Image (spheres, rainbow, N blue to C red):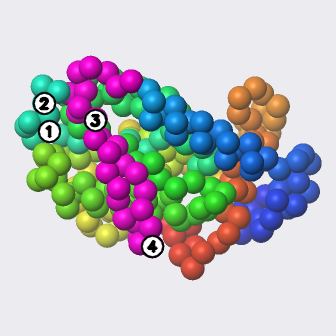
C-alpha cells in the first residue's frame, strides 16, 4: 500500500506500482506545449483578459489570469477563483475555454491561477499558491473591481482538492467569507482503498495506477510545512 509519508523516490514508485515511473522529461515537454497553447489561443471577443504575477509564501512568483465579460469590465463584479485540474503535475489544458464560458454565463470575473506543479514543486507549493491567490483577490478587490463579499471557489479533479483545501484553511484562519465552493470530481481521498480503485486499474485516460502515481509525485519531498497534510 502506498502511504504519502513512505514515498521518497522514483524507485519507490517503480517498486510499489510495478511499472516504470512517469517520464519527467515527457511531462516537462507536455507542460511547455500546454503553456504555449494557452498563450497562443485566441480569446473570445467578448472577454477582457489580463495576466498578473503573484508572489507566494516563499517569495517566488507564479502567473494568474483574469477573465471578465467586456460589458462588465468597468464595474464591480462577483469573483470566481478557478483552480484547474491535471493530477497536480500538468498545466492548465482546456480549462481556459471553460472559464471564459463561465465568465459569460455568470457575468463575473474569473481568476485562474497557474499554481506551481509537482514533481518539481511538491506539496505544499501548489496549495500555497492557490491560497495566495485568494488572499490577493481579497486584498486587491478594489483594484480588481471585485465584490469581496461575493467570492467563490471552483475546481476540477486536482483543482477540486485545492478548492476544498483553500476553503478549509480559510475557515481555520477566518481570513474572509467564501460564498460557496464548487467541486468537480475532486480528489478528496488519498487512502486509495475504495472499490473503484481496486477495480479500475487499467482503464484509458486515468486509472488506479495513475492515481497512485499522482499521489507519489505530489508528496515525494515532505517539507517543513508537511503538517498541513493533516488538515
Cα distance between the residues tagged 4 and 2: 34 Å
Q: Could you say which is closer to the camera, residue 54 or residue 180?
A: 54
**Residue 28 visible in the shown view:** yes
Question: Which badge, 2 or 3, comes first in the chain's sequence?
Answer: 3
Using the rendered view, name the quadrant where residue 195 is placed: top right
**Residue 119 pos. (x, y %):** 66, 57
**Residue 19 pos. (x, y %):** 90, 46
**Mark 3 packing: few (<14 Cα in 10 Å), some, or many (20+)?**
some
* Magenta-drawn stretch contains 184: no
Magenta span covers which residues? 42-69
Direction from residue 73 to residue 90 in the image, left or right:
right
Instruction: Report the predominant secondary structure element of the magenta stretch.
Output: strand
Q: Could you say which is closer to the camera, residue 107 or residue 96?
A: 96
Direction from residue 218 to residue 210 in the image, left or right:
right
Residue 49, disc: 3
Direction from residue 219 to residue 56 in the image, left or right:
left
For the point 10% across and 41% down, the residue is: 76
Residue 58, disc: 4
Question: Which badge, 1 or 4, comes first in the chain's sequence?
Answer: 4
Question: Which badge, 1 or 3, comes first in the chain's sequence?
Answer: 3
Question: Which badge, 4 or 2, comes first in the chain's sequence?
Answer: 4
Camera-near label (2 vs 3) is 3
Q: Would you place residue 134 above or below residue 34 in this image?
A: below
Residue highlighted by disc 1: 77
**Mark 2 packing: few (<14 Cα in 10 Å), some, or many (20+)?**
some
Amino acid at each position: 500500500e502506498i502511504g504519502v509519508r513512505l514515498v521518497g523516490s522514483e524507485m519507490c514508485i517503480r517498486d510499489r506500482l510495478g511499472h516504470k515511473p512517469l517520464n519527467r522529461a515527457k511531462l516537462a515537454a507536455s507542460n511547455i506545449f500546454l503553456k504555449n497553447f494557452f498563450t497562443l489561443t485566441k480569446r473570445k471577443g467578448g472577454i477582457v483578459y489580463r495576466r498578473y504575477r503573484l508572489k507566494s509564501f516563499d517569495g517566488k512568483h507564479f502567473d494568474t489570469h483574469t477573465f471578465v465579460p467586456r460589458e462588465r469590465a468597468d464595474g464591480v463584479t462577483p469573483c470566481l477563483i478557478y483552480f484547474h485540474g491535471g493530477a497536480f503535475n500538468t498545466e492548465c489544458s482546456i480549462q481556459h475555454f471553460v472559464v471564459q464560458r463561465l465568465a459569460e454565463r455568470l457575468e463575473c470575473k474569473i481568476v485562474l491561477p497557474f499554481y506551481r506543479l509537482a514533481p518539481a514543486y511538491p506539496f505544499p507549493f501548489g496549495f500555497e499558491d492557490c491560497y495566495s491567490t485568494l488572499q490577493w483577490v481579497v486584498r486587491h478587490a478594489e483594484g480588481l473591481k471585485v465584490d469581496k463579499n461575493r467570492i467563490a471557489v471552483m475546481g476540477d479533479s486536482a483543482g477540486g482538492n485545492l478548492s476544498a483545501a483553500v476553503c478549509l484553511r480559510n475557515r481555520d484562519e477566518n481570513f474572509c467569507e467564501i460564498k460557496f465552493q464548487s467541486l468537480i470530481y475532486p480528489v478528496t481521498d488519498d487512502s486509495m482503498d475504495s472499490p473503484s480503485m481496486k477495480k479500475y486499474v487499467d482503464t484509458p485516460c486515468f486509472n488506479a495506477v495513475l492515481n497512485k502515481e499522482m499521489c507519489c509525485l505530489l508528496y515525494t519531498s515532505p517539507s517543513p510545512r508537511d503538517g498541513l497534510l493533516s488538515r
